[in-house]
Image (cartoon, rainbow, N blue to C red):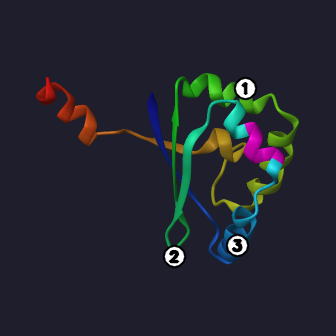
């Protein structure tokens, strides 16, 4: 399972609306994410608008590609794009992916055998 963490910056004056939109994501969008391989997907938002996303996928590149081919994703990304600072392109393609440098289970695994 591939673990992916990414960051975006929500415009300070749009934070409350961003939170409201994510409190009630369209059911069609939720189903599309799950059906295309986005698992254990979470977003975390700091008060200054720093957004951290985390998702697990068997193949994240394939999950992104499959999601990009859905109509609901095109509509969602078009609406969400206006919430972010210094974003080139769609939010689901323009985020900064962070390097994983530690995972507890990965390090415990060799010691448990």
In the image, which disc is placed on residue 66?
1
In the image, which disc is placed on residue 47?
2
Q: Who comes first in sequence, dot 3 or dot 1?
A: 3
Q: Secondary structure at mark 3?
A: helix
Crowding at dot 3, Cα within 10 Å, few <14 / some 14-19 / many 20+, comes out as few
Q: Which is closer to the viewer, label 3 or label 1?
A: 1
State yes or no: residue 30 in magenta: yes
Check the image and report above or below for 75 versus 105: below
Magenta span of residues: 28-32
The residue carrying mark 3 is 14
79 lies left or right of 9: right
Residue shown at 72%/26% (left/top)?
A: 66
* Quarter in which the C terminus is drawn: top left
Crowding at dot 2, Cα within 10 Å, few <14 / some 14-19 / many 20+, comes out as few
The picture places residue 48, in percent across and down from the top left corner, at: 52, 74
19 lies left or right of 104: right
State yes or no: residue 15 in magenta: no
Q: Secondary structure at mark 2?
A: loop
């Amino acid at each position: 399972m591939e673990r992916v963490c990414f960051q975006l910056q929500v415009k300070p004056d749009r934070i409350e609306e961003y939170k409201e939109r994510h409190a009630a994501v369209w059911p069609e969008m939720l189903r599309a994410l799950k059906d295309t391989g986005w698992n254990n997907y979470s977003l975390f938002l700091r008060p200054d608008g720093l957004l951290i996303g985390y998702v697990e996928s068997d193949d994240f590149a394939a999950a992104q590609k499959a999601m990009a081919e859905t109509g609901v994703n095109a509509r969602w990304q078009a609406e969400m794009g206006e919430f972010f600072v210094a974003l080139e392109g769609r939010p689901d393609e323009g985020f900064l992916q962070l390097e994983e440098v530690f995972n507890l289970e990965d390090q415990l695994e060799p010691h448990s055998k």
